[in-house]
Image (cartoon, rainbow, N blue to C red):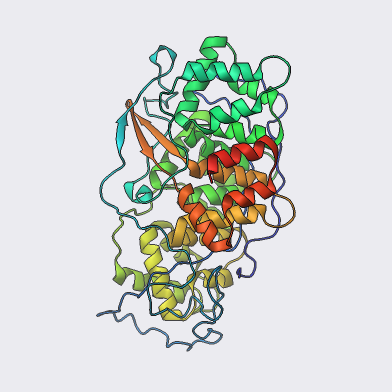
Amino acid sequence: MSYPGYPPTGYPPFPGYPPAGQESSFPPPGQYPYPSGFPPMGGGAYPAVPSGGFPGAGGYTPGGYPAPGGYPGAPQPGGAPSYPGVPPGQGFGAPPAGAGFSGYPQPPPQSYGGGPPQVPLSGGFPGGQMPSQYPGGQAPYSSQPAAMTQGTQGTVRPAANFDAMRDAEILRKAMKGFGTDEQAIVDVVASRSNDQRQKIKAAFKTMYGKDLIKDLKSELSGNMEELVLALFMPTTYYDAWSLRNAMKGAGTQERVLIEILCTRTNQEIQEIVRCYQSEFGRDLEKDIRSDTSGHFERLLVSMCQGNRDENQNVNHQLAQEDAQRLYQAGEGRLGTDESCFNMILATRSFPQLKATMEAYSRMANRDLLSSVGREFSGNVENGLKAILQCALNRPAFFAERLYYSMKGAGTDDSTLVRIVVTRSELFSNIKNIISCMQIDLVQIKQIFTQMYQKTLSTMIASDTSGDYRKLLLAIVGQ
């Protein structure tokens, strides 16, 4: 059951992909040769996943919590909206006695110690060149904190015995002459990592003096073209490019801004800001200020600082204090203190926010997501909810968006492409070492099945067709 007004129905129109007149552009090394026009994101209701048991209030005397049901209009335990997979009558506001809500997919266990495995960088570009770098020698991709990746897994792996020149030759033959061998393109693109695709692109230009991206655009069309070009985009650039095009021209695709800025880690956001300046010659914060306004503008400006606390330890005393502050800033007063919500949701770590949500539910007999829906509206509501939803269960956040991109008549292919590509894998090149940061598409698939009683691949197969479907399924896996 979704919350009132979230998400808004409909998606903003797709602005065109790629724009006319830019097909032949290919910047020199150090820039990314991709078109503009990033698609909007989808949305939908989000299932919460509170953990069993709530922190006690030992020694904490904040001036008195409200008694259960003591505020006008407060629902009785079990009266808050239910989530997908939760039996009727068991609302978020009534903490269960067990380990969690029955029927709701639990997030994968995460161990926060240690870091990702590292292996030497094999192969290389023709001439031994590394991918393009930012000024100062910084690599164009960045890793996530170990806490964000431990216990999660992507579906794309680097190919063994990789040969960039051999793959470039396969792609050349697939596009040479009359017609196109789309299956050969699918076989190469779906089974290579993003890092390996960058090497194929460089090898193709060295061998044939032609731009691989330009050739692919001339041979492909529609959703297949959009998916293939997205797979050839370096990860950080993909996000920066998406933000630029969400704010370019008439209108603003607010949901793209929310999806990226409210869900990425500090390091990812900082790299996106640098890439945005390097590739487009523009300041991201200034563009946000010129394209948004009010409390939504303030939230996004806070997000693009990339300065959230990422300490994975939870302070339960602080969680209860923040829960009290949020109640007094919203449900417990006439009007809303928006700055209080912005401060807490923009600065606290995701594990800390999850503990705050649990404390709030215990204290107010209402879940915090519901309160945000009552106190806010429009884009700022969607942004605040996205932060809370990621704090609860990040894979479920994306599973829900995938579901709603395909639910009902028609398919929001832009959202489908974006989430499948960005959650399938991420590689970070740092000083000739490749650090494998496995994103969470495997966990998204698992939770998707639990939430909707069907597999992601089954739903994709029924909503797409042709080579586009083949390539999506090859990336997602069965």
- Residue 183 lies, in percent from the top left, at 63, 29
Left-right relation of 315 to 222: left
Left-right relation of 337 to 417: left
Residue at coordinates 51% horizontally, 86% vertically from top-left? Answer: 76
In the rendered image, the vertical position of residue 16 relative to residue 46, given as above or below: above
Instruction: Name the quadrant containing residue 319.
Output: bottom left
Q: Can residue 348 be seen in this view?
A: no
- Residue 195 lies, in percent from the top left, at 45, 29
Q: Which image quarter is the N terminus in? A: bottom right
Name the one closer to the observer, 274 or 165. Answer: 165
Name the one closer to the observer, 326 or 338. Answer: 326
Q: What is the total number of numbered labels drawn onto the structure image?
A: 0
Q: Is residue 77 visible?
A: yes
Name the one closer to the observer, 246 or 428. Answer: 428
- Residue 464 lies, in percent from the top left, at 68, 44
Instruction: Name the quadrant containing residue 217.
Output: top right
In the rendered image, the vertical position of residue 139 relative to residue 402, given as above or below: above
In the rendered image, the vertical position of residue 12 relative to residue 170, given as above or below: below
Residue at coordinates 61% horizontally, 68% vertically from top-left? Answer: 2
In the rendered image, the vertical position of residue 164 relative to residue 192, given as above or below: above
- Residue 212 lies, in percent from the top left, at 59, 20
Left-right relation of 392 to 309: right
Residue at coordinates 48% horizontally, 78% vertically from top-left? Answer: 93
Residue at coordinates 37% horizontally, 73% vertically from top-left? Answer: 99
